[in-house]
Structure formats: C-alpha cells, structure tokens
C-alpha cells in the first residue's frame, strides 16, 4: 500500500531503480544522492563513513553512475591555483553525446580541495529542484455510487377466503394463537395473528381440517428459526390445497332379490312381499302393477 506523503519525499524515476545495467550498490547510491540537499558531501570518504560497503565498492558505484550519466564530476583550477571539484547529479541520465550540452538541474556547489598531499575535499551534490507534490484528491469529487443490490421479487400475497364467514375467521385466529403450544418459537403477536388469519380461513374454506392445518404449520420447523411469521406466511401460500370437488350423487345399485311370501319364488323388489304373479291372483291386493 502506498500512502500519500506531503513532506520529506524524493521523486526518483524507475529508469534508475529498475536499471538493468547498474549494480544494486550503484542504484542505492544514486537514489541516496538524489535525496540529499544541495551542497551535501558525496565524496568517497564521506559516503564510506555512512555506509558499510567500503571505499572500493562506493568508488566503483560512483564510476557506474558517472558512466551511465546520473552524475558528472568536473575538476577545475581556481585563479588562486587550487583544484576544486564540482559534482552534478541528474534525475534524468545524460548520455555521453550531450553531457556537455545539457544544463545541470541546479547550480553546482564548489568545494576547494588541497592539491598535494591532502585528501580530496568532499564532493558536493547538486540536486534538481523539488517537484511540487500532486494535490490531494479533491473533496468535490463525486463518490462512486454503491453497487446496486440484486432485485428480489415481492412475496406472493396471502390467500383469502372467497366468502367472509366470521365463525371460520375466529377459528383461524384461535388456531394461530395456539401454535405456541406445539413450539414456543411460534409465539405470535396479535397483529401477526390478524395478518395470517385470512390465510388459515382460506384453508378451512377449502375443506382442510383444523388439525391438518396445524400440523402443516407447526411441524418440521428449521432449527435456526428466526422469522416465524415469514415462515408461516410462506407455508400458507405455497402449500394451499385445492378446493374440494363438488359432491356427486351415488349411482343406484341393483334392486335386491326378495322371496315371495306367497310362492317363495325369488324376485327383485325394494321390499319383501308378493311377486307379480301372486299379486295378480291374490284378491286381497287387487291387480298388480307391471
């Protein structure tokens, strides 16, 4: 994660930090030199006193940076006869063909160095002017809208009876209120009973027995039941039974056989008595019906 740093930072190009021909010592030394203020000492003695690489490795790293155009060291003689060294540091490397033509990023700092035999004087570094940091994100930027939630279809409405019957509605409300006897989690508020009662009344209107409705609503409950009202409404809607078909009249069966009281002959008649022949000959009964 990269945090915004409003102070104490240095802009260094990837062409240095990811250079394929420079050693890691030269890359680190180049980044260190670019982070120093103008006039800081970057001679071998000063740098070897800061880091553990030693004079030989630091001297080699400085030569690498100079060969690839990241620094330029110029020795000049002053009018007083002393030798001075100027070190120019470039945040963009200068190739050999334009090293002399390229202007330095900032004016060089001149440090006198004794000719013989005094050790070389510290080499000052010239850094490019600080680049203005990017402004923080504007507070007027419109934030991105939150992702839209997936649309859920509305639940189907509860069933209702076709004809309002007060007695059936009271039975439905009593059935819902007694569900807590089967499971304590089915303790319903009065407003929930009023909401679900029409659905139970629709079941009763379709011929469902109260015990069957109660078993359907109160059995096989999930172990982590959190919304009992929603579960009851779902069962009342999804498991609604169809209406009972209209009752049909039973078809008449065959006329039973009877034994004639006069001749003991079998004949078909709805009731016991005389057969047709005995009724025709019997004066007490008169003429028999066909």
Image (cartoon, rainbow, N blue to C red):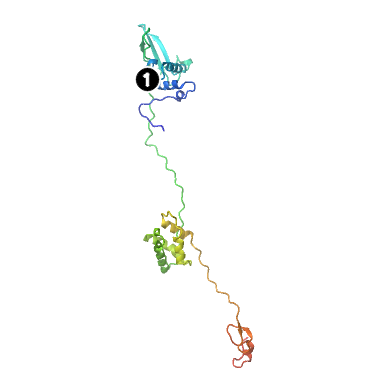
At label 1, counting other C-alpha atoms closer than 10 Å, the crowd grade (few under 14, some 14-19, many 20 or more) is: few
Which residue sits at x=39%, y=17%?
A: 48
Check disc 1 and report the residue beneath it.
50
The quadrant in which residue 160 appears is bottom left
Above or below for 267 versus 104? below
Tell me: 287 left or right of 199: right
> Please, is residue 97 above or below residue 288 in the view?
above
Work out whether residue 154 or residue 63 is closer to the camera in this orientation and state it.
Answer: 63
Secondary structure beneath dot 1 equals helix
Residue occupying the point 42% across, 14% down: 73
Where in the figure is residue 202, as x and y percent of width and height? 46, 64
User: Where does residue 249 sit, x and y in percent of width and height?
Assistant: 55, 74
Locate the N terminus by quadrant. top left
Quadrant in which the C terminus appears = bottom right
Q: Say whether residue 161 is visible.
A: no
Q: Is residue 191 above or below residue 263?
A: above
- Counting from the top left corner in percent of width and height, residue 241 is at 50, 63
């Amino acid at each position: 994660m990269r945090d915004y740093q409003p102070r104490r930072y240095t802009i260094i190009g990837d062409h240095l930090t990811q250079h394929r021909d420079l050693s890691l010592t030269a890359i680190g030394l180049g980044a260190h030199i670019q982070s120093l203020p103008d006039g800081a000492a970057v001679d071998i003695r000063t740098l070897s006193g800061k880091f553990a690489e030693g004079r030989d490795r630091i001297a080699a790293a400085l030569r690498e940076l100079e060969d690839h155009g990241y620094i330029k060291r110029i020795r000049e003689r002053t009018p007083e006869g002393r030798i001075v060294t100027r070190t120019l540091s470039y945040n963009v490397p200068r190739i050999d063909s334009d090293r002399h033509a390229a202007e330095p990023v900032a004016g060089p700092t001149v440090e006198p160095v004794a000719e013989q035999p005094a050790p070389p004087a510290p080499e000052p570094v010239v850094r490019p002017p600080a680049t203005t940091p990017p402004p923080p994100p504007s507070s007027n930027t419109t934030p991105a809208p939150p992702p839209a939630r997936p649309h859920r279809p509305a639940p189907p409405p509860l069933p209702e009876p076709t004809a309002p019957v007060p007695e059936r509605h009271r039975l439905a409300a009593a059935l819902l209120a007694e569900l807590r006897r089967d499971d304590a989690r089915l303790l319903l508020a009065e407003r929930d009973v009023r909401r679900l009662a029409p659905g139970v009344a629709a079941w009763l209107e379709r011929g469902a027995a109260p015990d069957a409705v109660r078993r359907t609503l109160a059995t096989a409950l999930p172990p982590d039941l959190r919304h009992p009202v929603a579960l009851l409404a779902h069962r009342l809607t999804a498991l609604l039974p169809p209406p009972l078909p209209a009752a049909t009249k039973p078809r008449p069966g065959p006329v039973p056989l009877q034994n004639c009281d006069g001749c003991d002959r079998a004949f078909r008649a709805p009731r016991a008595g005389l057969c047709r022949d005995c009724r025709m000959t019997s004066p007490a009964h008169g003429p028999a019906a066909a």
